[in-house]
Image (spheres, helix red, strand yellow):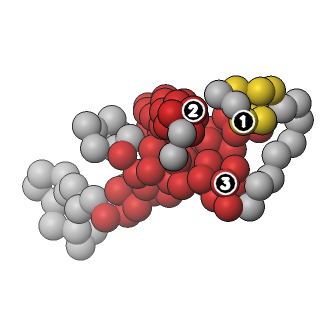
Amino acid sequence: MPAAAYALIGLFTLISTVSGVLASRLVGPSRWWTPLLPILASFGALYLVGHRLGWSAGPEIPMFGFRVSLPFDVAVALVVALATAAAQAGAFRLLQPQQRSPGRDGNA
């Protein structure tokens, strides 16, 4: 694989990381592990959309020897990261144990 391909993978890794961290901070509970799933989902979406399916929309710019639709790729990364962070936050809230008020037995 040429060095330019590694540079493009590095760029997509950076885009995925920033979008995953941003999405997890915007959506839900802030723990050290919450950005991991949105980052992975975002990178997977960029791989699927850009490499496997070859979809692109909007202006394409030459970057590292490839034609890249950077605004479209950033939008895909952000949307997927936000959706994944929202699903993760919902699952986290759903699986959290219910906290009871002290002195109540729940039979009121």
Depth check: 102 or 68 in front? 68
Q: Is residue 63 left or right of residue 89?
A: right
Give coordinates of residue 4: x percent, y percent. 57, 32
Residues marked 3 and 2 touching at CB (< 8 Å): no
Residue located farthest toward the front when viewing the structure as drawn: 2
Residue 85 visible? The answer is no
Sequence order check, earlier mark of 3 and 2: 2
Dot 3, crowdedness within 10 Å: few (<14), some or many (≥20)? few
Residues marked 1 and 2 touching at CB (< 8 Å): yes
Label ID, residue 51? 3
Give coordinates of residue 36: x percent, y percent. 36, 46
Kindly identify the amino acid type of the residue bearing the numbered disc 2: Ala
Give coordinates of residue 77: x percent, y percent. 62, 42
Residue 82 sits in which quadrant? Answer: top right
Q: Is residue 47 left or right of residue 63?
A: left
Depth check: 59 or 78 in front? 59
Kindly identify the amino acid type of the residue bearing the numbered disc 3: His
Instruction: Residue under label 1, please give it.
Output: 66
Give the CA separation, mark 3 to mark 2. Answer: 15 Å
Query: Vertically, is 24 above or below 108?
Result: above
